[in-house]
Image (cartoon, helix red, strand yellow):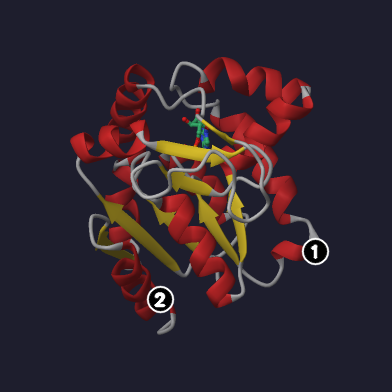
């Protein structure tokens, strides 16, 4: 089974995708995490991606499609993948069709104001990538690996508003794209986290 998680920045895609991947035994692939790893390693791809990410813009389709086509060739992607942050444009969704068969698209629905608020309180472990909210976790180190909790450079209000606008313009058309394919399920992403996780698991366990 291959699943796409769709939703604006700050909709909780990463958190839900990571939980569902563990529960459904799927590989969690986050393009944002993959790009941040490239930036950390100072690769050519990372340097290119950084200039787009810092502005809240999308990294060019050709770069992302190449990166994901290669990733899908690896052995661990053969048993099912949960895609978080990809595809983000119609061109990427069309390219994905020739890479893998998508069984379900989970669309997380949340308003811009909620997102800005959430992202302002988001902290990410610099070591393992675990995501926290300062509203529910007051410590400065990770509960799982004791890594330092940091603020993502693109998690400031100006960039998050730009990212939301980019989402509405370039990614939201994928809602219709996957609706037309008959595989889209929309989920209210403002539900309490455990309730939301059960709801999504209910959808995925029927596939
Ligand atoms: P995320 O961690 O999913 O919020 O992604 C962070 C940033 O990485 C985005 O704002 C984009 O600049 C870039 N990015 C991640 N995934 C993609 C993608 N599929 N296409 C283009 N840019 C992407």
Q: Please tell me which of labels 1 and 2 falls first in the chain.
A: 1
- At 42% from the left and 38% from the top, the residue drawn is 122
Using the image, determine if residue 24 lies above or below residue 155: below
| Relative to 171, 186 lies left or right | left
Label 2 CB, ligand 1: below 8 Å? no
Task: Specify the quadrant of the image occupied by residue 173.
Answer: top left
| Residue 4 in view | no
Quarter holding the C terminus is bottom left
Label 1 crowd bin: few (<14), some (14–19), many (20+), radius 10 Å: few
- At 77% from the left and 22% from the top, the residue drawn is 42
| Relative to 161, 17 lies left or right | right
- In the rendering, at what x and y percent does residue 97 appear? 54, 55
Task: Name the residue beneath numbered marker 2.
Answer: 201
- At 39% from the left and 41% from the top, the residue drawn is 134
| Relative to 102, 22 lies left or right | right
- In the rendering, at what x and y percent does residue 140 appear? 54, 38
Task: Name the residue beneath numbered marker 1.
Answer: 75
Q: Please, which residue is most extreme toward the front here? A: 139
Label 2 crowd bin: few (<14), some (14–19), many (20+), radius 10 Å: some
Q: Nearer the viewer, residue 165 or 110?
A: 110
- In the rendering, at what x and y percent does residue 99 appear? 63, 55
Secondary structure of the residue carrying numbered label 1? helix
Using the image, determine if residue 198 lies above or below residue 193: below
Q: Please, which residue is most extreme toward the bottom here? A: 206
- At 60% from the left and 45% from the top, the residue drawn is 129
**Closer to the eye: label 1 or 2:** 2
Q: Nearer the viewer, residue 160 or 105?
A: 160
- In the rendering, at what x and y percent does residue 39 appear? 69, 26
């Amino acid at each position: 089974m291959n699943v796409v998680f769709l939703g604006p920045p700050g909709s909780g895609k990463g958190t839900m995708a990571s939980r569902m991947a563990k529960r459904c035994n799927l590989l969690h692939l986050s393009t944002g995490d993959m790009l941040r790893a490239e930036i950390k390693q100072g690769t050519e791809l990372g340097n290119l991606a950084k200039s787009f990410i810092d502005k809240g813009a999308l990294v060019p389709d050709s770069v992302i499609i190449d990166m994901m086509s290669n990733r899908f060739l690896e052995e661990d992607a053969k048993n099912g993948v949960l895609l978080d942050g990809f595809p983000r444009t119609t061109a990427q969704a069309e390219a994905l069709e020739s890479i893998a068969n998508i069984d379900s698209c989970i669309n997380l629905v949340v308003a811009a104001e909620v997102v800005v608020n959430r992202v302002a309180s988001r902290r990410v472990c610099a070591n393992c990538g675990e995501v926290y909210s300062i509203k529910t976790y007051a410590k400065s180190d990770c509960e799982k690996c004791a890594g330092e909790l940091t603020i993502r450079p693109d998690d400031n209000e100006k960039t998050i508003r730009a990212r939301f606008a980019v989402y509405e313009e370039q990614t939201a058309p994928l809602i219709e794209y996957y609706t037309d394919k008959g595989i889209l399920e929309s989920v209210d992403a403002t539900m309490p986290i455990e309730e939301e996780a059960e709801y999504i698991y209910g959808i995925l366990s029927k596939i």
